Amino acid sequence: MVVQHKYLFSEHEDVRISIRLSEQAFHKSHAPLYANHLFCNSFAMSKIEKHLIEYYPDRTAIVIFDDMRENQCEKLNKGAISCGYELNDGQIDVEATYQIAKHSKNAVAIGFDAINDDDLILVRDDRLSDNIFILMYVSENDDEDDMEIIYDPENEYEICLY
């Protein structure tokens, strides 16, 4: 099962507050579910990158590939970060993102702590406009690597279940 909801970044709130308030609204609308994925474009992702560097100086809330922890932490300590899994034909491309992380000068953050202390997985989707992000719940029973993420960024729907 997948549940998704579209949100706008507020001009009057910082990114952190917009995301946290949206996570709370998502949970309130879809209890007992919590969002576990956040989709946004590269511009919005750069705001999240800045937020992660500024608000998590100990880096404990940032999720990186476990087998690259030492290498990635070194890059994080230098403040060099990029965020989000890559999409390939509408699917999260774990292998491409892993290879990018391996060879990049930046640490690649694939998520950060959500309001329920699980991870909020970040996905870069340049089909979305600058001020829009989508929170999504993907059940653990679904195989994310094989699951096509289907939605129309231009469509003003609120929730899609499938």
Image: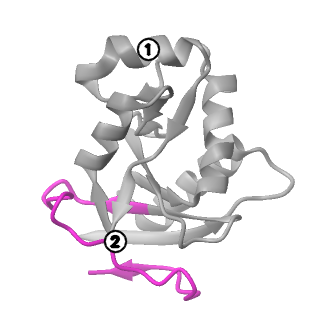
Tell me the residue at 39%/81% (across/down).
Answer: 160
Would residue 45 be seen by someone viewing this image from the given angle? yes
Q: Name the residue under label 1.
A: 73
Quadrant of the image containing the N terminus: bottom left
In depth, the one of 122 and 32 nearer the eye is 122
Q: Name the residue under label 2.
A: 90
Tell me if 145 is positioned left or right of 130 in this view. Answer: left
Residue 24 placement (x, y as % from top left):
56, 52
Residue 6 placement (x, y as % from top left):
56, 71
Is residue 146 found inside the magenta-colored segment of the image?
Answer: yes
Characterize the local packing of mark 1: few (<14), some (14-19) or many (20 or more) Cα atoms within 10 angstroms: some
Would residue 59 be seen by someone viewing this image from the given angle? no
Per the model, the C-alpha gap separating discs 2 and 1 is 29 Å
In depth, the one of 53 and 117 nearer the eye is 53
Characterize the local packing of mark 2: few (<14), some (14-19) or many (20 or more) Cα atoms within 10 angstroms: few
Q: What stretch is highlighted in magenta?
A: 136-162
